[in-house]
Image (cartoon, grey):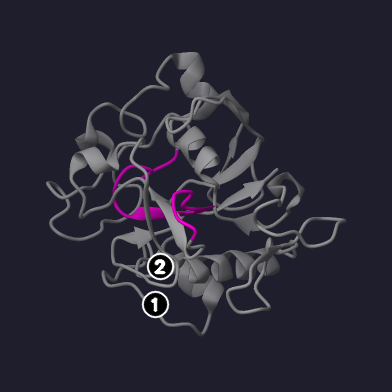
Amino acid sequence: MKSKFKDMIFVKGGKYKPYFTDDEKEVFDLEVCRYQTTQKMWLEVMENKNNPSKFKGIYKLVDTVTWWQALEFCNKLSEKYNLEPVYDLSKKRMLMINQLGEEKASPDIADFKKTEGFRLATEVEWEWFARGGQIAIDEETFSYKYSGSDNADEVAWYNKNSNGESQDVGSKNPNQLGLFDCSGNVWEWCFNKNESTKKNNYRRIKGGSWLSEASWCSISPRFYYNSIYSRSDIGFRIVRTI
C-alpha cells in the first residue's frame, strides 16, 4: 500500500510479545515516516519557528526539541493536510486526545485507532516497526539486536562512528521495512510516560543516539527523559493510524 504522504511507509499490524513485557500486544496498521524528522521538515511545517537544532543541516534530523514541541509539530503537519490533529494542546501541559466522532479522551484511556492525524508512536508500536514488523517475523529476522541488523555499524550512528554529532538521515542501511535510523542518530520521543514514576512529565525515548554506546542503540533499552526539556541527542519520528 502506497501512502499519499511523502516518506510515509505502510506498516502492516500484527501481534507480538514486546521485549519489556510477557504479554502479547496487538499493533494495528500504521504509516511510519521513513526518516526521523529532519530540519527541512521542521522548518517547512513550523514556518516562522527557528531551527532549534545544535547540529545544523537540512537533511540532518531536528534535535533539541521537547516532547511538547514534537506534539505541536504533529498537529501543525496534520492541519497542513486537513487531518484532524491528534493532540488537544489548548491547555498548557494538560493534554487530551482528539478521537474521531467522539469526545476528547485523556491520554491514559485514548484509543489511537480512532485518530486521524500525525502523532508520536507508542512504545509498543515503536518496537514493532523498529524490529521490522510482520516482514521480519516472516523472514525470521525479528530478533535482530538492532533495527535491521545484528551489526550496529551497518544501521546506526553511535559514539564510535558518529564523529561526535548527528548525521544526515538515511545514510546507514534501513531495516526490513525500509525505515532508517531506528537505532542510533538521535533518541526518538515516544508517547508513553514512564510507568515506574508518577511524574507525568517523563516520557519514553527509544533507539539510542550519536552520543550513545552501541548497546544503548539496540531495540531493548528503555530510557526516559523529562518532556519539558530538550537535548541535542533527542529527536522524533512521526506515525499515523491507517
Q: Is residue 65 shown left or right of residue 44?
A: left
Instruction: Give the Cα distance between marks 2 and 1.
Output: 7 Å
The residue positioned 65% from the left and 53% from the top of the image is 108
The residue tagged 2 is: 39
The residue positioned 75% from the left and 65% from the top of the image is 82
Camera sees residue 60: no
Prevailing secondary structure of the magenta residues: loop
- Please report the bounds of the magenta region as a residue range: 179-198
Q: Is residue 204 magenta?
A: no
Percent from the top left, x then y, of residue 96?
Answer: 69, 65
**Quadrant location of the C terminus?**
top right
In the picture shown, does residue 16 fall above or below 44? above
The residue tagged 1 is: 51
Q: Is residue 157 shown left or right of residue 100?
A: left
Q: Is residue 196 magenta?
A: yes
Percent from the top left, x then y, of residue 47?
Answer: 53, 80
Q: Is residue 182 shown left or right of residue 99?
A: left
Front in this rendered view, residue 225 or 169: 225
Camera sees residue 201: yes
